[in-house]
Image (cartoon, rainbow, N blue to C red):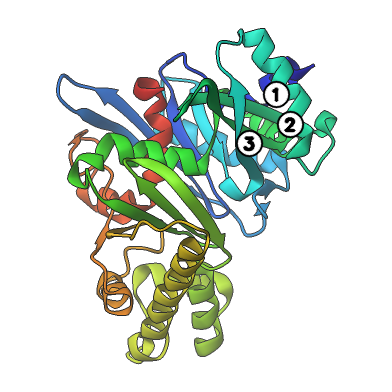
Amino acid sequence: MLQHRMEALNMIFKRALPKVIGMDISGTSIKVVKLSKLEHAYQLDVLGYEPLPPNLVQEHEIQNVEEMARHIKNLVSRLKLDNSQVAIAISGSAVITKVIEMNAGLTEYEQEIHIESVADQYIPFPLSEVALDYDVVGPIANQPNKVEVLLAVARSELVDKYKTAVELAGLTPMYIDVETYAIERGYHALLHDQYPDKVVAVVNVGNLVTTLNVLANGRTTYTREQLFGGKQLTEEIQAQYSLSFEEAEKKKRANDLPADYHQEILTPFMQTIAQQIARSLQFYYSSGEHRDIQQILLAGGSSNIIGLTEVIEAELHLPVALIHPFSKMKISKQISEETLQAYASSLTAACGLALRSFTG
């Protein structure tokens, strides 16, 4: 039945608000954020990071559930977390989303029957192999008898692996979100008031994938992923200086590289990032969207390279800023400034997941 498949996805659009920890499981690391709500601000209570071995996650799918569970358990144990309820996310490219129309005024049961009848038109898999959820977005302009419905679908096998890894680590997955929505939630709750009337492109430069999310009025109107990220920089360092991948990654993070590194490798890499963003923007404008991008915000573990914002500004002729999701928060005394600066830009999705405790 449809309800069973919706339970498998664990309700992306679930409205209850249990207190949860945001846990972002990516291809290279697990990142954890725990927030609390003060009278006029949020507070960052816990920040955690656990690197993952290469290829444990491939094409957004966990390859060894038991090994992933061990890494999650190690991180949770190290952080001494007092809450076992978590919100996790799967990559936007692993989820099919579609806006469809539906008659207004239907009961919840009638809505589910309608979704059941039309879902297979948009899904390239048998319905028995997918998990899905939907949310009624709102009425359609000039059609008072119709509403827009956002449908989200993912393969059950992929979703189950994430759920099982978390459960084997002794945690309860309260939400399985979509990374795109998690980033949108973080932006809307923490940054939207800085750019209230602007069309903003949030560019998440990860280790394997760079994602462009275009937001207007704080809501995602376009998203695109490209297979490009910090791993390419590590591989170029590896080849240039005859290092192992692990040595190259370590030296990259420590900025312990020869004098010619900046000119020969880093600057061309930053220029390539700018070109990749420019290509994504070309796809955005050619998709039929005509609202001009007015601001670019950078996030992700590979976004805080010194000089990157200036290189992108020169290429795109747009203002560029680095996201710091905790800039307006109070910070627990247990979190050092060094740790915060090292990981802040890569924690936008984890922060958005943690905000499920307060914003739905």
Picture coordinates of residue 265 (x, y %)?
42, 85
Q: Mark 1 points at which residue?
A: 115
Q: How far apart are marks 1 and 2 (CA)?
A: 6 Å
Q: Residue furthest front?
A: 142
For marks 3 and 1, give the CA distance: 34 Å
Frontmost of labels 3 and 1 is: 1
Query: What is the number of callouts on the image?
Result: 3
Can residue 49 be seen here? The reply is no
- Residue at screen point 73% across, 40% down: 122
Q: Residue at 44% across / 77% down in the picture?
A: 275
Q: Picture quarter containing residue 127?
A: top right
On the picture, is 112 further left or further right than 40?
A: right
Numbered label attached to residue 119: 2
Amino acid type shown at disc 2: Ala
Query: Which of 210 and 293 lies nearest the eye of the viewer?
Result: 293
Name the residue tied to disc 3: 69
Circle 3: residue type:
Ala
Residue 106 or residue 184, whichever sits in front: 106
- At which x and y percent is residue 323? 28, 53
Q: Name the secondary structure under disc 3.
A: helix
- In the image: residue 141, left or right of residue 38: right
Res. 186 image quadrant? top left
Whether 219 is drawn above or below 289: the answer is above
